[in-house]
Structure formats: structure tokens, C-alpha cells
Amino acid sequence: MQTKVKSKKLQSSRLGKQKKEFSFPLEKENFMIIGAGIVLLIIGYILMAQNSVDGFVPTVVSPIILVIGYCIVIPYGILKRPKSLISVTEQSEQKEETDVSKSSVSSNIKTG
């Protein structure tokens, strides 16, 4: 009797722990944008490494390039959604809108 209960538990636990498909959220385009951000960072640090303390490039241009790299380009590369995912979400939103419009035909509001 106990072996039957244990075998049923094992079977149910095996069915519940099936392998889930893993897809990496970043695609080639995301990595290209992140790579461009890293290139901007390298250029910014190279410009900042000049020996001139009072120069325009090390004190003004390189910090602007670094801020653009850190705060705009790299986060955009991380947060940009792939086009395939965008089209799938648009289709599901359109389907939800049609489902909502079909279900909201009857109303509980009294008009007269």
C-alpha cells in the first residue's frame, strides 16, 4: 500500500517538474547597442586621460560622452524589446480588446 502511494507521488512530482523552455531575453541587436555603449565609454575614458587639466576635451567633452554611454545607450540596449516580441504583444492586446468589446455588450447601467 505504501509503495503505491510513493509511486503516485513520484509520478506526480515528475510531471510537475517538466523542463521549461528558456529563452534569453536579449538578441543580437541588443548586444550591438550595448557594445556601442561600451565603445563610447572607452572613448570617453581615453579622452579624459589626456594630460591637460584645463583642457576643453578632458573636462567637458569626455564627461558628456560618458554620461551618454552610461545613462542612455547601455540602458537602451538592455531595455529594448525584440521586434518579434512586440508583434506578439500587439496581437494579444488586439485580441483582448475584441474580447472585451464582445463581453461588454450588456450593461447594468439604467439609462431611463
Image: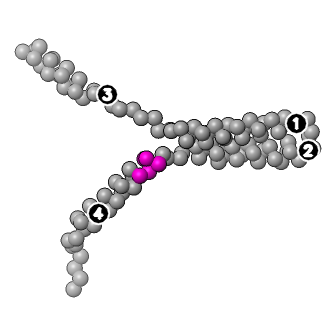
Q: Amino acid at mark 4?
A: Thr
Is 9 within the magenta? no
Distance from disc 3 to disc 2, alpha carbons, whole Å, reads 59 Å
Estimate the spatial distance between the alpha carbons at disc 4 and disc 1, rounded to whole Å.
Answer: 61 Å
Provide the residue designation for mark 3. 19
Do residues under tags 1 and 2 come within 8 Å of each other at their CB atoms? yes
Q: How is the image coloured?
A: one colour
Residue type, label 2: Gly
- Give me the disc on residue 98: 4
Point out residue 9 in the picture as x, y percentages from the top left corner: 17, 22
Query: Is mark 3 in CB contact (under 8 Å) with mark 1?
Result: no
Disc marking residue 50: 1
Q: Which residue lies at the image location 89% right of the left edge and 47% below the top edge?
A: 56
- Left or right for 67, reference 101: right
Q: Quadrant of residue 32?
A: top right
Mark 3, secondary structure of its residue: loop
